[in-house]
Image: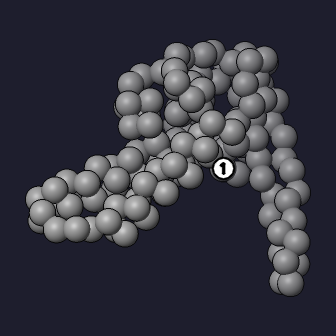
Amino acid sequence: MLLDFLVPGKVFEGKNIKVFSEHQDYNNAGGNSHQAYFIRTDEHKFWVERDFALLARDQQKLNYSVSRIFEEVNWAYLEEADVRFRGSLRIISGFIVPILFLLAVALAFRLKKDLGIFLFVFQVLLLANLVFLLM
């Protein structure tokens, strides 16, 4: 996961970009909802934040990088507006969760104590992250 995030992915140049918004309901007692925005090119579809989506509507050219293993969009760049987007969920799933797991293993090894439950929680977190990336 960490390698997939750190190694530069394949860069695409999306010329035919379309920005869509989708109303998403939470279906809970609060009845809350929000608008989610995504960009569709000829090859890929990926979620972006609102400000980036509104800027992308007026642009003709979008460069973006797709990771080689999990085929997740690492970043997107609007050349004309000089704005780069890197999703926070991608940073968490591709960088922070694997780093936390490695730190937990290093801590257990350094302390030479039985931290079985502590490591088990991080293993489950890493496995859930892997399932998320594969979906």
Q: Quadrant of residue 54?
A: top right
Which residue is rendered at x = 76% and y = 41% of the image?
38
Q: Is residue 59 above or below residue 31?
A: above
Within 10 Å of the Cα at label 1, are there few (<14), some (14-19), or many (20+) other Cα atoms?
Answer: some
Q: Please give the count of numbered marks on the rendered protein.
A: 1
Closest to the observer, 59 or 22? 22
Q: Residue 72: horizontal and vertical position, in percent?
A: 59, 32
Which residue is rendered at x = 61% and y = 44% of the image?
131
- Residue under label 1, please give it: 49
**What element does badge 1 sit on?**
loop
Q: Quadrant of residue 117?
A: bottom left
Q: Is residue 123 above or below residue 75?
A: below
Q: Quadrant of the N terminus?
A: top left
- Left or right for 47, reference 85: right
Q: Residue furthest bottom?
A: 29
Which residue is rendered at x = 84% and y = 47% of the image?
21
Amino acid type, mark 1: Glu
Q: Is residue 98 above or below residue 43?
A: below
Q: Residue 23: horizontal and vertical position, in percent?
A: 88, 57
Q: Residue 73: horizontal and vertical position, in percent?
A: 59, 32
Q: Is residue 31 above or below residue 108?
A: below
**Quick check: can you spot residue 12?**
yes
Closest to the observer, 14 or 89? 89
Q: Quadrant of the C terminus?
A: top right
Closest to the observer, 65 or 128? 128
- Left or right for 9, reference 118: right
Closest to the observer, 63 or 65? 65
Which residue is rendered at x = 74% and y = 31% of the image?
45
Q: Residue 19: horizontal and vertical position, in percent?
A: 80, 36
- Left or right for 78, reference 37: left
**Quick check: can you spot residue 58?**
no
